[in-house]
Structure formats: C-alpha cells, structure tokens
Amino acid sequence: MSTRCGSGSPAARRPARAAASGNLPLAGGDRLCGARELRDPVHEVALVVRERRDVLLRAYRHQLRWEDLEDCYSQATLELLAHVRRGGTFADRRHLSHTLTLRFVSRIRDARRATAGRSPIAAALAAAVSLSGAGEEWFAVRDCRPPVEQAVMLRHDLRRVGRLAQELTADQRLALACQLAMDMPCAEFCRRYGWTEEKYRKVLQRARARLRLLASSEEEQCPDAATGSETAAGRP
C-alpha cells in the first residue's frame, strides 16, 4: 500500500496546489502567474497604453499643445479601460493598439473643434507653432506684408479709383464691381443680368479705358512749383 504513490496521492497534489496558489516560489508558478496576467484585458490595455504613449504623442505633436495631447491620451485610455471592464474584448494587441490610436485621434479632433469654436484668437493660438526650439538667435520670421510706403500708395490708388469710378456709366460700374469685388464669372453675370458675352466684354474694356483716361488726366492737373499753391504757401 505504501509503494503505491502516484500522481493522485495527497503528497503529489500538495506541491501543485501550492504552486497554483502562488505560495511556492517555483519557476512553474511564475509562468502560471504570467500567463494569467496576459489573459487579463485590463492588464493588456495597460501594457499597450504604456508602450504606445511616446510614439503617439510625438506623431501628433503638431496638432495640439503637449498638455492637451496628454489629456486626449488619458481620455482615450479611460475609454478603453471602461470598455474592457464592461466585458469588451480585443482580438490581439494589434487590434488594441489600432483602437487606442483611433480613440486618441478622435479626442484630438474634438479638442480642436472645441478650440476653434471659442474665439478667433483662441483658434489662432491653438494653431500657432512655437519658435522656441527653432533657434531664435538665427531664425528670422519673414514679413510678407508690403513696405509702409508701398501700402500707403496702394491705399491712395484704391481710394482714387473708387472716386473716379463714380464718373463711369451704370453698366460700366456694375460690370467692374461684379468682376473685381464679387469675382463673378462672365457666364453667371450674363445669365443674371441678361447680357451677351460680347456686350460684357465691350463694357469692361470701355470701363477700364475710361478709368485710365480719368486717372491720367487727374495726374496732369496736379499744380507744379511755378503756378501751383506751393508758391503761395503761408500767404494770406
């Protein structure tokens, strides 16, 4: 009777029970514990979130500020945790990683829409790119605006054209206004006002020629230093 000591005896089952419960620090017990943790969805989410965090934050760093990106990533993580705690599962870690990326991008889009809807200055600040890491000591921002003198002359010419346009006919002013101010194509203008394309072309040509003639004649009427008001400056 004592020689029959098989796998079903209490002495043989005791180490197995101890290893399964974690009380016995054996390699087999560690492998069992590791397998049990890999089958835990919450643990899988934690592993994938920690692994993909730096990669996703660097990939979408141009979308939002770093603090806002971290908030979006935290929201995506909480959504995944809530999903698995409700009983949701994933096919594998690749499926979990893709789901995390989609939820992270969705939260970024929500944050950008919320920022754009607050005010124009908030949207501009959110879309601005910091120059702190670009080497400000040599990085020069290009100013695309014209010089001050050129801007003044352009505004003066624009006001003069508006004043001289009052001397054109009604049809000429209408055609010029629709072409310049409204950027209306010829076909749409002719369909709306019942003109032919030939009439539209001739009216615009005559309007431009009339404006050039008025502008040149106004320049010729400017007084010179001999007969103009400059000689009478300061006199009563």
Image (spheres, grey):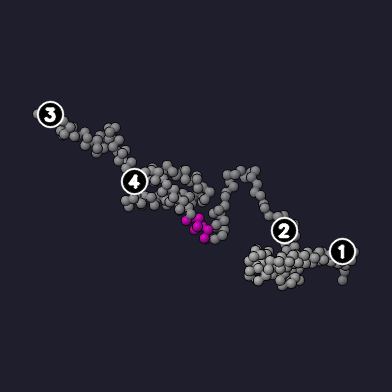
Residue holding disc 2: 151
Q: Is residue 25 above or below residue 114?
A: above
Q: Is residue 106 above or below residue 212?
A: above
Q: Quick one: quadrant of the N terminus?
A: top left
**Distance from the alpha carbon under mark 2 to that under mark 1:** 25 Å
Name the residue located 32 percent from the left edge and 51 percent from the top edge.
87
Residue holding disc 4: 41
Q: Which mark is residue 236?
A: none
Magenta stretch encompasses residue 114? yes
Tell me if mark 4 has few (under 14), some (14-19) or many (20+) residues whose alpha carbon lies within 10 angstroms of its own. Answer: many
Q: Quick one: quadrant of the C terminus?
A: bottom right
Q: Quadrant of residue 217?
A: bottom right
Tell me if mark 3 has few (under 14), some (14-19) or many (20+) residues whose alpha carbon lies within 10 angstroms of its own. Answer: few
Q: Is residue 236 above or below residue 118?
A: below
Horizontal side of residue 220 vs 37, given as left or right: right
The tag earlier along the polypeptide, 2 or 1, is 2
SS assignment at label 1: loop
The tag earlier along the polypeptide, 4 or 1, is 4
The chief SS type of the magenta part is helix
Q: Quadrant of residue 218?
A: bottom right
Residue holding disc 1: 224
Amino acid tagged 3: Arg
The residue range painted magenta reads: 110-118
Name the residue located 22 percent from the left edge and 35 percent from the top edge.
16
Q: Nearer the viewer, residue 103 or 51?
A: 103
Mark yes or no: residue 181 visible.
no
**Distance from the alpha carbon under mark 1 to that under mark 3:** 132 Å
SS assignment at label 2: helix
- Do the residues bearing badges 2 and 1 touch, measured as CB atoms within 8 Å? no
Q: Which mark is residue 4?
A: 3
